[in-house]
Image: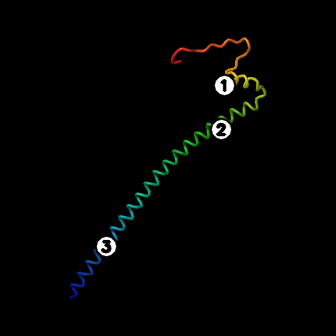
Amino acid sequence: MAQKKSANAKKRKQKRSFILTLALFLLVGYFIITIIGLQIEIREREEVKEQLNIEYQQIIADNEYLQSIVDNEDKGDYMEQIAREKLGFVMPNEKVFYDITPGA
């Protein structure tokens, strides 16, 4: 009888040990998958951050250019440049040539 109780206790202990080992492996697996997912998310967000940083630097450069125009006392040259490039204005008696070759 003592042998039977000992065998049952040993079986229960093995069963409990197997369940604990399985639970431990599942828990470790869950943590590994979670860490991998977080690493992927961190990498994606760093790429977005880098892209936003590039855009920020471009905006800063544009602002510095515009500020230099505002600070410049000779605004006439800038207004003339804008009138020519964006609005297509020309000075009186000035000849303008347009390139109409295909692909140019």
Q: Name the residue under label 1.
A: 86
**First along the sequence among labels 3 and 2:** 3
Amino acid type, callout 2 = Ile
Specify few, some or many for label 2: CA neighbours under 10 Å numbering under 14, 14-19, or 20 or more: few
Residue 68 lies, in percent from the top left, at: 72, 32
What residue occupies the far right of the structure in this picture?
Answer: 73
Residue at horizontal 33 percent and vertical 67 percent from the top: 22
- In screen coordinates, is 52 left or right of 85? left
N-term-proximal mark, 1 vs 2: 2
- Crowd rating for badge 1 (residues with CA inside 10 Å; few <14, some 14–19, many 20+): few
Amino acid under label 3? Ser
**Under tag 3, what secondary structure?**
helix
Which residue occupies 29% across, 74% down? 15
Q: Position of residue 19 (x, y in %)?
A: 32, 71
Label 1 amino acid? Lys
Provide the residue designation for mark 3.
17
x 36%, y 68%: residue: 23
Which residue is at a point 48% across and 48% down the rendered structure image? 43
Compared to residue 74, the image places residue 33 above or below, namely below
In the figure, residue 76 lies in which quadrant?
A: top right
Q: In this view, does 37 lie to the left or right of 21?
A: right
Residue hosting label 2: 60
Residues marked 1 and 2 touching at CB (< 8 Å): no
Which quadrant of the rendered structure holds the N terminus? Answer: bottom left
Q: Nearer the viewer, mark 1 or mark 2?
A: 1
Distance between mark 1 and mark 2 Cα atoms: 23 Å
